[in-house]
Image (cartoon, rainbow, N blue to C red):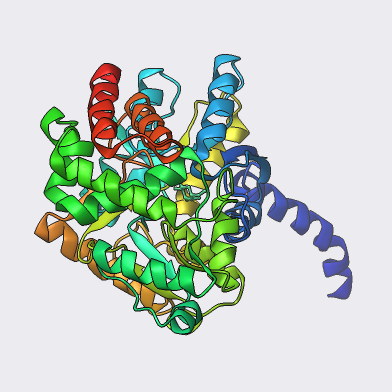
């Protein structure tokens, strides 16, 4: 018996190997272009890398620093123009359509069908992931942009109340200033100015006005008394930032709130990723509140990876696996726990998520029913990039000069109409 096994073993092994060989994954490489370089962001993207490697593939990281992704998009353009597109790139919103128009994106319908994406994504999300009715991108999350992050110890020290509208904001900010602390942690970069501004517009004008201005690009809304008032509030906010704000990265501004140097920051919930990475607990070390005047409304920012056409067969296998993994529950949960966002995939348990994420999840659903779910202008969800750029330019020019609010609203309308 022993002898039989002794001779049979190698033959058996070879037979087994031959049987298994065709089923083995063809290991491929994916090059992934993204801009997730802050503490919380890097921790999040590492989850995707690990899962892809676990599936037998190689991850080539193409990280381009710069919050909001402007630099990353510049690099992407030059790579594609020179015929050297990455396998996947963090591309969001209407910009996906622009890349579709270029004929650069690949069809993911087979992966989507196998993974039942059509039933697992809210329509507001799946629509964005398609070009001409075909899947070309995969969503990783839903970020809420209209948040305010506050340090309760700073408010306590200043005897200030956490504001729920922009009048209360001015009172609280003044008290924090009097206490010798920085009221608003801000980074003076165009996308951060625009992030703050869109929350102000939502808080002052409400969701319908926001939509008229930043989705319909309606001249009457852009150059209106409500827009003038929004710029006035932006001026107030700017006056409560510190002298080192110009050029500061957003995560360094978040760190000021974490350390108790500043009272609050207006930023999407990727900021929560920084609090989480620093071991801070919501409700205790920090407070998440909808930006003043925006409770019940939700500016969404959906991060997604668009997939480029690849020639190499093994790279195609790896690319499909990447797309499949992104939509799987394991990734959607762990990634979003780190990132501060909520899963894009429907039906996920929120049990492991904190109260900020639970609130975000509940408000995402309720705002879609009350008409208060709006796309983030500052994060490329509401317009093509050229119009977004025109808005950025005006808001930043106002932020960094003594331009009047009235002139800013007129300039905003002119810039947007000119970019159409
Ligand atoms: C946003 C992006 C977020 C976050 C942020 C700061 O545009 O959607 O995921 O990373 O930029 O970099």
Q: Position of residue 206 (x, y in %)?
A: 16, 53
Number of marks in the rendered image = 0
- The relative height of residue 107 versus residue 63 in the rendered view (above or below) is above
Where is the C terminus found, in terms of image quarters?
top left
- The relative height of residue 145 versus residue 133 in the rendered view (above or below) is below
Query: Quarter-wise, where is residue 67 in the image?
Result: top right
Q: Is residue 372 visible?
A: yes
Write the residue at 35% across / 27% down. 390
Write the residue at 39% across / 31% down. 107
Write the residue at 52% across / 46% down. 322
**Along the line of sight, the residue nearer the viewer: 156 or 299:** 156
Where is the N terminus found, in terms of image quarters?
bottom right
**Along the line of sight, the residue nearer the viewer: 417 or 272:** 417
Q: Position of residue 228 (x, y in %)?
A: 21, 41
Query: Quarter-wise, where is residue 75 in the image?
Result: top right
- The relative height of residue 74 versus residue 191 in the rendered view (above or below) is above
**Along the line of sight, the residue nearer the viewer: 384 or 342:** 384
């Amino acid at each position: 018996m022993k002898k039989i096994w002794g001779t049979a073993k190698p033959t058996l092994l070879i037979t087994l190997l031959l049987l298994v060989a065709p089923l083995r994954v063809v290991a491929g490489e994916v090059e992934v272009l993204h801009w997730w370089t802050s503490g919380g962001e890097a921790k999040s993207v590492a989850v995707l890398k690990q899962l892809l490697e676990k599936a037998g593939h190689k991850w080539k990281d193409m990280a381009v620093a710069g919050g909001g992704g402007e630099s990353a998009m510049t690099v992407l353009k030059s790579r594609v123009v020179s015929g050297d597109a990455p396998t996947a790139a963090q591309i969001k919103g209407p910009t996906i359509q622009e890349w579709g128009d270029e004929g650069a994106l690949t069809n993911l319908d087979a992966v989507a069908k196998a993974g039942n994406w059509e039933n697992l994504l809210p329509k507001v999300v799946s629509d964005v992931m398609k070009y001409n009715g075909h899947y070309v991108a995969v969503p990783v999350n839903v970020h809420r942009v209209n948040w305010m992050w506050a340090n309760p110890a700073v408010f306590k020290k200043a005897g200030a109340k956490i504001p729920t509208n922009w009048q209360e904001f001015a009172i609280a900010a003044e008290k924090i200033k009097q206490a010798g602390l920085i009221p608003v942690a801000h980074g003076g970069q165009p996308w951060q100015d625009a992030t703050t501004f869109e929350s102000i517009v939502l808080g002052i004008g409400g969701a319908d006005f926001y939509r008229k201005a930043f989705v319909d690009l309606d001249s009457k809304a852009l150059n209106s008394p409500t827009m003038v008032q929004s710029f006035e509030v932006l001026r107030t906010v700017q006056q409560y930032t510190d002298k080192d704000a110009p050029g500061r990265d957003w995560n360094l501004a978040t760190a000021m709130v974490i350390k108790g140097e500043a009272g609050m920051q207006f930023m999407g919930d990727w900021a929560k990723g920084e609090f989480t990475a620093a071991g801070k607990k919501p409700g205790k070390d920090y407070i998440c509140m909808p930006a003043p005047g925006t409770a019940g409304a939700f500016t969404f920012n959906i991060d997604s990876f668009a997939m480029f056409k690849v020639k190499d067969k093994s790279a195609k296998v790896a690319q499909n696996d990447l797309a499949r993994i992104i939509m799987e529950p394991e990734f959607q949960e762990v990634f979003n726990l780190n990132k501060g966002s909520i899963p894009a995939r429907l039906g996920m348990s929120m049990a492991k998520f904190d109260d900020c994420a639970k609130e975000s999840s509940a408000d995402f659903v309720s705002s879609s029913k009350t008409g208060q779910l709006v796309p983030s202008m500052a994060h490329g969800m509401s317009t093509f990039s050229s119009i977004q750029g025109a808005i950025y330019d005006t808001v930043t020019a106002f932020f960094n000069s003594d331009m009047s609010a009235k002139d800013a609203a007129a300039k905003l309308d002119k810039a947007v109409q000119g970019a159409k």
